[in-house]
Structures are given as structure tokens and as C-alpha cells.
């Protein structure tokens, strides 16, 4: 290497995209644990009911599993780092109810963990996960999918919410 060679590294190249993706989840879990240790009086789930947190974390796997199955059926990539490599826009199954089932699963795991800890502080730490992930990852994915699938993706977004729920079409029977 000569003195004229300049190496520029982005955060993704330096740290690794996979590691950066885990930051919001790990940060939220760590904040929950800290809140539980420092604010133990702020309990919102009685000890006898904290086992529900394990059930919630177990059920949280279902949207991600459904997404994985739908991606395999469509023979498209599951890699969120390269949405432009998608061979198909998956809109059926769990994707008919949420545009981000894998991220929804992660968020439900964090909420389940807060229930298991029984701490209101831990629950309050879980709440910013969705807006943070939306800003850090999801918006970029949506832009890439919008460019890749143009009008088809825009129509899909008009019918399915980012996190959960279908939009009612004007004039549709309720």
C-alpha cells in the first residue's frame, strides 16, 4: 500500500452489518435488565403471573417462522441487508397482516422478557425498540423494496401496516 492509497470504511464495513442489526435488540434487553435492577419497586406483573412472559416469548416466534416459510415458498431471499436481491414480493400469509413479521417477533420477545422480569421499567425500555428499528433499518428496506418492486410495493403498503394490521379500503364492508 502506498501513501496515496486511501481506505474509507463505513460503519457497516468496519463493524459488520449483522452486528449493527443486533444493536437495538441488545441495547433494549440490557436497558430492561438495568431498569429491573435499579427500579425494583416498579413492578407491574405479580410474581405468580410472570411465567406469562415465557409464553409470550414462545408465541413471538410464530410471525418470524411464518415469514421464513413464506420466503422459502416464494424462493426469495430472507436477508434484510439486500432487499434489492428479492425475487418476489411476499404479501400472503403473515405478510398480509404485517410488513415486518421478523422485527415484530423481536419486539414481542422484548415485551415478553419485560413481563417475565415483571418490571415496569423493563417494559418502558422495550417500547422504543420499534421506532428505533424503524428509523435505523426498516425505512431503508422499504425504500429499496419500493425501488425494486415500484407500484406493487406501494399498493402493498397501502393495504398492510408496517407493524401490524390491515388497512380498511374506503367503501369496503366492515
Image (cartoon, rainbow, N blue to C red):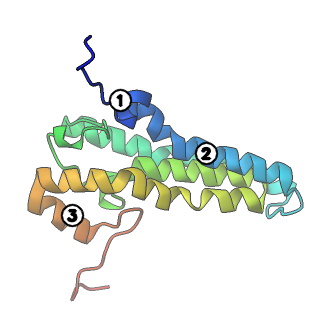
Q: What residue does disc 3 label?
A: 156
Query: Based on the displayed image, in which of its 4 quarters is residue 45 positioned?
Result: bottom right
Q: Is residue 76 visible?
A: yes
Separation of residues labelled 2 and 3 (CA atoms): 31 Å
Residue 21's tag is none
Q: x and y percent of residue 78 in the render? A: 30, 37
Q: Is residue 135 left or right of residue 122?
A: left
Mark sitting earlier along the chain (3/1): 1
Q: Residues within 10 Å of mark 2 (few under 14, many from 20)?
A: some
Name the element at disc 2: helix
Q: Residues within 10 Å of mark 3 (few under 14, many from 20)?
A: some
**Most distant residue in the front direction:** 3
Mark sitting earlier along the chain (2/3): 2
Name the element at disc 3: helix
Q: Is residue 37 left or right of residue 88?
A: right
Tell me what residue is drawn at x 26 percent, y 56 percent: 142
Q: What residue does disc 2 label?
A: 27
- Is 133 situated above or below 23? below
Mark sitting earlier along the chain (1/2): 1
Q: Are marks 2 and 3 in contact (CB under 8 Å)?
A: no
Name the element at disc 1: helix
Separation of residues labelled 3 and 1 (CA atoms): 32 Å
Q: Is residue 150 left or right of residue 27?
A: left
Please name which of the two marks, 3 or 1, marks the residue nearer to the observer: 1
Q: Residues within 10 Å of mark 1 (few under 14, many from 20)?
A: few
Separation of residues labelled 1 and 2 (CA atoms): 21 Å
Q: What residue does disc 1 label?
A: 13
Question: 10 or 167, which is in the foreground?
Answer: 10
Q: x and y percent of residue 154 in the render? A: 17, 65
Tell me what residue is drawn at x 12 percent, y 60 percent: 152
Q: Is residue 174 left or right of residue 33?
A: left
Amino acid at each position: 500500500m502506498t501513501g496515496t492509497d486511501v481506505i474509507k470504511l463505513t460503519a457497516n464495513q468496519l463493524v459488520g452489518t449483522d452486528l449493527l442489526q443486533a444493536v437495538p435488540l441488545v441495547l433494549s434487553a440490557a436497558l430492561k435488565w438495568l431498569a429491573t435492577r435499579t427500579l425494583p419497586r416498579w413492578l407491574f406483573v405479580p410474581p405468580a403471573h410472570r411465567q406469562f412472559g415465557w409464553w409470550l416469548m414462545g408465541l413471538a416466534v410464530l410471525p418470524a417462522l411464518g415469514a421464513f416459510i413464506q420466503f422459502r415458498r416464494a424462493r426469495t431471499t430472507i436477508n434484510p441487508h439486500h432487499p434489492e436481491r428479492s425475487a418476489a414480493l411476499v404479501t400472503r400469509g403473515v405478510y398480509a397482516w404485517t410488513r415486518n413479521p421478523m422485527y415484530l417477533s423481536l419486539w414481542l420477545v422484548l415485551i415478553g422478557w419485560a413481563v417475565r422480569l415483571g418490571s415496569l421499567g423493563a417494559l418502558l425500555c422495550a417500547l422504543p425498540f420499534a421506532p428505533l428499528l424503524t428509523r435505523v433499518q426498516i425505512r431503508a428496506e422499504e425504500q429499496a423494496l419500493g425501488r425494486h418492486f415500484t407500484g406493487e410495493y406501494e399498493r402493498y403498503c397501502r393495504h398492510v401496516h408496517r407493524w401490524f394490521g390491515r388497512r380498511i379500503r374506503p367503501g369496503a364492508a366492515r
